Image: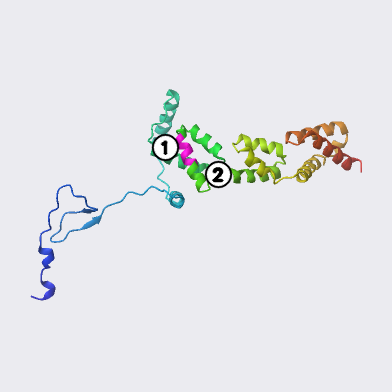
Amino acid sequence: MPDWAKPDPQAAKAPASEPAGAADSTSKLPERGHRRIIVPALQEDKKPESVDELRAAMERIVAAPAPPKPSKKERREAREARKLARETGEAEELTDEQWREKARNILLRQLTASDKTAKQLKDKLLDKECPEEIADEVIERYAEINLVDDQRFAKSWVVTRARSRGLARGAIKHELRSKGVDDELAAEALEQIDDEAEEQRARELVRAKLRPESMGADRDKALRRLVGMLGRKGYNGSMAFKVAREEWDERFRS
């Protein structure tokens, strides 16, 4: 008999029996003839511990394909269940891990739309009846990987509001405080605007209002309107009146 046709002596031996209860890292399927198919056991995903692992986990979440959309019937039933829960005052029953997953998804959607402070995100989670300790935990983890940064938010907010809305430092500071930004961080961010830049922005706002010729008909009335406009944007009264008077005189008396 040629060598290739001879049976394998190792395959002919019966496999040794294992003691009952012995742990094995592989899953074994029934034998087929003299061979066994050994499939590696599935391992559970390790929970991220370090910042790098959490960042990688976040990237996997974002890159993962979207789950199939529920049918109209399923959406209707879910709405009815939520409505009933609100009417009866019953909180949604989820495990801590389910709440964490839900909180992460909510924060991802919120941060995708625009940058937000930790307070804004926490308020959103509490509105969704997320347990406070889990909300704090998830937000803290996001802060560790710089997805939540109140200092960055404050600096960006100051520049945007001063440029697009022409707000003075006082008004911007009030906005930052309402969004939960610490006064120290707000003061640091507001250093981007000095007195000269603030006055220049006020003059630009006044000049825009003085373009119509009708603003030159009644000086006192025009000044009241201009000072009121600057006051609503957070400019102090003395600067507002000085700028309004000088710009009106420049526009209609020169």
Q: Amino acid at mark 2?
A: Ala
Q: Residue at x 11, y 67 (%)?
A: 9
Q: Residue at x 52, y 45 (%)?
A: 143
Pointer 2: what residue?
113
In this picture, residue 78 sits left or right of residue 201: left
The mark that comes first in sequence, 1 or 2, is 1
Give coordinates of residue 163: x percent, y percent: 70, 45
- Residue 223 painted magenta: no
- Residue 138 painted magenta: yes
User: Residue 186 or 85: which is nearer the viewer?
Assistant: 186
Q: Marks 1 and 2, how far apart in space?
A: 21 Å
- For numbered disc 1, what is the local secondary structure? helix
- For numbered disc 2, what is the local secondary structure? helix
Pointer 1: what residue?
99
Compared to residue 14, the image places residue 112 above or below, namely above
Q: Amino acid at mark 1?
A: Trp
Depth check, mark 1 against mark 2: the one in front is 1
Q: Residue at x 21, y 50 (%)?
A: 23
Count up the numbered dots.
Answer: 2
Q: Mark 1 near mark 2, Cβ–Cβ under 8 Å?
A: no
Residue furthest to the bottom? 2
Is residue 218 visible to us here? no
Residue furthest to the top? 88
Give coordinates of residue 213: x percent, y percent: 85, 39
Q: Quadrant of the N terminus?
A: bottom left
User: Residue 28 or 205: which is nearer the viewer?
Assistant: 28
Secondary structure predominantly adopted by residues drawn in magenta: helix
Compared to residue 85, the image places residue 36 above or below, namely below
Extent of the magenta region: 133-139
User: Residue 247 or 130: which is nearer the viewer?
Assistant: 130
Give coordinates of residue 182: x percent, y percent: 61, 38
Is residue 228 visible to us here? yes
